[in-house]
Amino acid sequence: MFRLGCVVLLVSLVVVGCSSLPSQRDMSKEQVFICGAYTVKTEFKNEQLVVRFDDRQDTLNQQPVASGAKFVSEDGESTFWNKGDTANFIWRGESLPDCRAADSLPKAFSASGNEPFWALSMNAQQVEVSTPEKEWMATVTEIESVGDDSSVPSWRVNTANGDQLDIRAKVCRDSMSGMIYPFTVNYSGDFNATGCGGETIDLLQGPKWILTEANASMTPSSNMYIQFLADGKLVGSDGCNQRFGQYQFGSEMVHLKWMGSTRRACSATVMEDARSFAEAVNNVRAIDFDQNTLIIESRTGTRLKLKHEKT
């Protein structure tokens, strides 16, 4: 039996919640969540929640909680806790990036564009817009999911003043900086503009990005990768040694920096490849994203292509 409540309630596949909490999703049906660069699917079967992402799968049992719906593996190593359109997911002791339902927007959403410059921030209640000429706020009256012939999730945000915001979950490149973002945005009404929205890190955080191609004299290896963790932490391997460092994304810049590494000795060829790889990451000029491939352009002229570890 699927259980949910603000106190422990027993219900038969019926979503029940407190008025102060977001509307609970029906976890008895298949759901899709976006957790950083991971896509996680859940399905309620035989009184248990089956969780799948990449080529991994686990079966979790429901636990009574004061809010939302929480599921835990038999050994306690994996937990999926859904609250409304968000979820926390721990896989084998490792916390994945914060999850949101694939058919919902991030709770706090921002976007911007150029020629002329504009910027906005939005939550479920209001939109704040800024241009060189003026600033204004508009009350959100409706956020609706709009379907088309593609599989790309899309939303339309209507406001009390008649303005409209169309958002698509399609990778967008800023027309001036070239920075990549997870959403393409069109604003119409008080002014008409296009731009990009969301946070760059949401395209990258979580999985290992493994080197598959380079224009430099190095041999790509599955042991050469980078991984973006929470709080700006960068980890990876140059093919010989494990590395750790920091990353930072801004509206007009990207900064990756190795801070240290292990001290393992390898063959001369492997060491040279490791040096070239580490140098390219340390001197990143720009990044791009194309069909689940992360492209790093280095100031040294090196171009790296890295694939999500399971694609």
Image (spheres, rainbow, N blue to C red):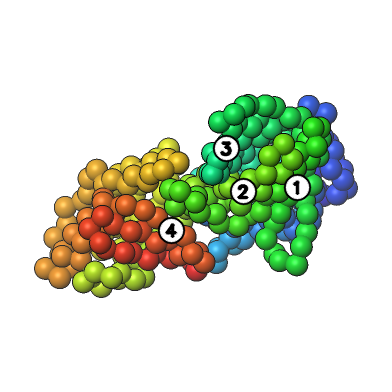
The crowding category of the residue bearing disc 2, from other C-alpha atoms within 10 Å (few below 14, some 14 to 19, many at least 20), is many
Q: How far from the left and from the top, in percent, is residue 52?
A: 62, 60
Instruction: Give the quadrant of residue 119.
Output: top right
Foreground tag (2 vs 4)? 2
Residue 287 visible, this orientation: yes
- The label on residue 156 is 1
Nearer to me, 171 or 132: 132
Q: Nearer the viewer, residue 62 or 37?
A: 37
Instruction: Count neighbours of disc 3 (C-alpha within 10 A) and say few if under 14, some if 14 to 19, many if 20 or more.
Output: many
Of mark 1 and mark 2, the one earlier in the sequence is: 1
| Image location (x, y in percent) of residue 177 | 43, 48
Q: Give the spatial CA distance, label 3 vs label 2.
A: 9 Å
Q: Which residue position is annotated with label 2? A: 194
Asked where in the image residue 3 lies, by quadrant, the reply is: top right
10 Å crowding of disc 4: few (<14), some (14-19), many (20+) = some
Q: Residue at x 37, y 66 (%)?
A: 305
**Secondary structure beneath disc 2?**
strand
Q: What crowding class fits label 1: few (fewer than 14 Cα within 10 Å), some (14-19), or many (20 or more)?
A: some
Return the residue at label 3.
Answer: 118
Instruction: Identify the residue under disc 4.
Output: 288
Q: Which of the marked residues, 3 or 1, is nearer the chain's N terminus? A: 3
Say which label, 4 or 3, has the lower sequence index. 3
**Distance from Cα at disc 4 to Cα at disc 3:** 23 Å
Q: Nearer the viewer, residue 253 or 192?
A: 192
